[in-house]
Amino acid sequence: MNKWYLNGIKQVLQSMLDWVNRIQNKSPRQQASSLLARQVHIPTPIVTVGSALVLFALLLPQVGYYIPHVLALAGLIAVLTLFFVLYIRIDLPQFVNDDEGVFLIGLCMVLGVGFIELCQRFPAFSQYGVPVGAIAILVTLLLHIRLAFLVSAVLSIICGVLYNLSFNAVLVAFFSSMAAMLAARNVRHRSDMLRAGLHIVWVTCLCIYCLGLYHMWPRTVTLHRFAWAGINGALCVFLALALLPILESFFSRITPITLLEVGDFNRPLLRRLMMEAPGTYHHTLLVAALAEQAADAIGANSLLCRVGMYYHDVGKLEHPDYFIENQTMRRSAKDKAELHDKLNPSISSLVILSHVKDGVALARNYDVPDEILKFIPEHHGTSLIKYFYMQALEQGDEESPPAESFRYPGPKPHSKETVIGMLSDSVEAASRAMEEPTYERLRSLVEKIVNSKFMDGQFDEAPITLQDLRKIIDSFAASLSAIYHVRIEYPEMPEAETPSPLGQRRPS
C-alpha cells in the first residue's frame, strides 16, 4: 500500500538537513582550514537547544512533575536561553557561530547546577560552602570575563532558589563568584589558583560576617560558617584545577597558564629552534616582542600573540639553510642566497612554501595546542612570495608563471592575534634591509606593508578594524625605532693612556 505520508516526512527531513548544512558553513572552525578543522561539528543552535534541555532535565526533579511547575520551569529556561543568545549576539558576537564556545557555556551552566544539587543532597553541607566560584574561574579562563559575570549571576539565583529561596545563599554565591572571577583574571601559573582561593575565602567570610550582624547570629554560628567559607575556597580551587586541563583539551581552548608553559624555551621544539636555526630564533624573539606590544595597543591577547609567534617559523627546522636569516656566510643583504642560486624560482618557492606544512606537522608531533598552531599557516595567509615570483618573471619564459603557484596555501588570518602575527613578521623582515632606519622611514615602511596586505585581501576573514590597523602601525613604528635606535660613537683612548691588560700603566 502506498504510504502517502512518507513524502511529507521526507520533505521535512530534507529541509532539516539543508538547514544544518547552511549552519555548518557558517562555522569559523570549518572555514579556518581543512588542516585545522575539527572532525565533528554540531551547529550552534542545536548546541544551544541541547544545553537548555539538559538544564531542564537537571532541574525538573527539584520542581516536581506537577504540570504548572513543569511549564513554569520550561518558560524560565526558555527566557534564560533567549537572554543568553541576545546578550552574546550583542556584546560577544565572536561566540555566535562558535559551536564549541556555546557548548562550553552550556556545559559550565550544567556543571554549576550539578554542583549545587550535589551539595544539596548532603543535609550537613552548608549553603555557604557551594563552590559556584569554580565555574566563574573556568568561564573566565576559557571563555570571557563578561560571560563569567553573567553565568555567575544566573547560578547564584538558581542556588538561592534551590535552597528554599534563600537570600543568604544568593548573596554569598554571587560575591564569592565575583571574587573568583576577578582573581582569575590575574592567574598566570597554577600556583596562582591558591591566591584566587584565598580571595574567595575572605570575600565569603566578609559576606557571612555582614549577614551575621544583620541576622544577629551567635558568634559560634558565625565562626562555624567561616569554616564553610574556607571549604568553599578550597573546593573552588580543587575543582577548577581538576577540570581545567580536561576542558582545555576537549574544547581546544587555551589559558594563560598553558600559554606560559608552552612558551618556555626549555621545551624540546623551541630548544631545537634555538640550537639548529639560531637566525630564525633571533627573528622569532624580535617578532614576538613586536606582536606583543601591538596586541596590547588594540586590546588583543598579547600573551597569545607572543607565544604564537615563538612557534610561527618552526617549520624552518627542516631546511634551515634555505632561509636568509640562517645563512651565516652571507656578507650583506644584497648578496644572493647561495643555495637558491642552484634552483629554479619555482623550486625555490616550493622550498619556502614547505615550511608552513612542515611547521604544522612538527607542532602536532610536539603536542602544540591548536590555538598556537594556527599562527603557523595564518601568519602568511595566502600572500605572494614576491622575490621568487619576480625572479621567475625576469627569466623571460614564453608564458608568465601563474601567481597562484607562488602563493602560500593559507588560510588567511581569522583573528586579531594572527593578523598582528602576519604584520609583525613582514615588518621585521623588511626593516632589516633598510640602510638608514629613521622613525619616519620605518613608519612609512610599516604603512606600506599594512596597505599592501589590506589590498591583497589578507584581512578579509579577521574581525579587525581600520582603527586597530592604525594603532598597530603606531606600535610597530615606535617599537622598530627603539630597536634600530642610533648609537653614539665611543672615542678611543690615547695610546699613551691605554692601560695594560694587567691594569698597570705602560712605560712612556
Image: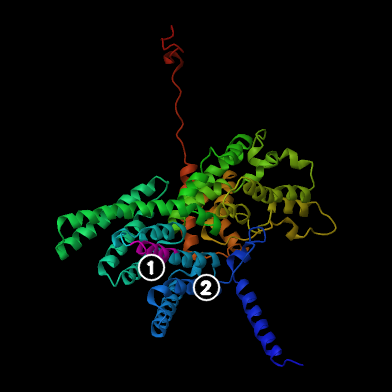
Question: Disc 1 on helix, strand or loop?
Answer: helix
Q: Residue furthest front?
A: 123
Looking at the image, residue 126 sits to the left or right of residue 392; the answer is left
Q: Which mark is residue 266?
A: none
- Residue stretch in magenta: 111-122
Q: Residue 302 in the image: x percent, y percent?
A: 46, 52
User: Residue 201 in magenta?
Assistant: no
Q: Which residue position holds label 2?
A: 50
Q: Amino acid at mark 1?
A: Leu
Vertical order, 495 against 377 (above or below) = above
Q: Amino acid at mark 2?
A: Gly
Marks 1/2: CA–CA distance? 19 Å
Residue 136 appears in the picture as rendered: yes
| Image coords of residue 295 (percent x, y) | 47, 55
**Residue at left 37%, top 53%?**
235
Q: Which mark sits nearer the N-terminus, 1 or 2?
A: 2
The C terminus, quarter of image:
top left
Tell me: 360 left or right of 128: right
Q: Nearer the viewer, residue 389 or 461?
A: 461
Is 256 drawn above or below residue 116 in the view shown? Answer: above
Number of on-image labels:
2
Taking 295 as reference, is 327 above or below it?
A: above
Whether residue 436 can be seen here: no
- Disc 1 vs disc 2: Cβ atoms closer than 8 Å? no
Q: Which residue is mark 1?
A: 150
Task: Choose between 280 and 77: the one closer to the eye.
Answer: 77
Please identify the quarter of the rendering in which residue 379 is found: bottom right
Q: Nearer the viewer, residue 144 or 279?
A: 144
Q: Residue at the right extreme? A: 398
Q: Position of residue 285 (x, y in %)?
A: 53, 42
The majority secondary structure of the magenta stretch comes to helix
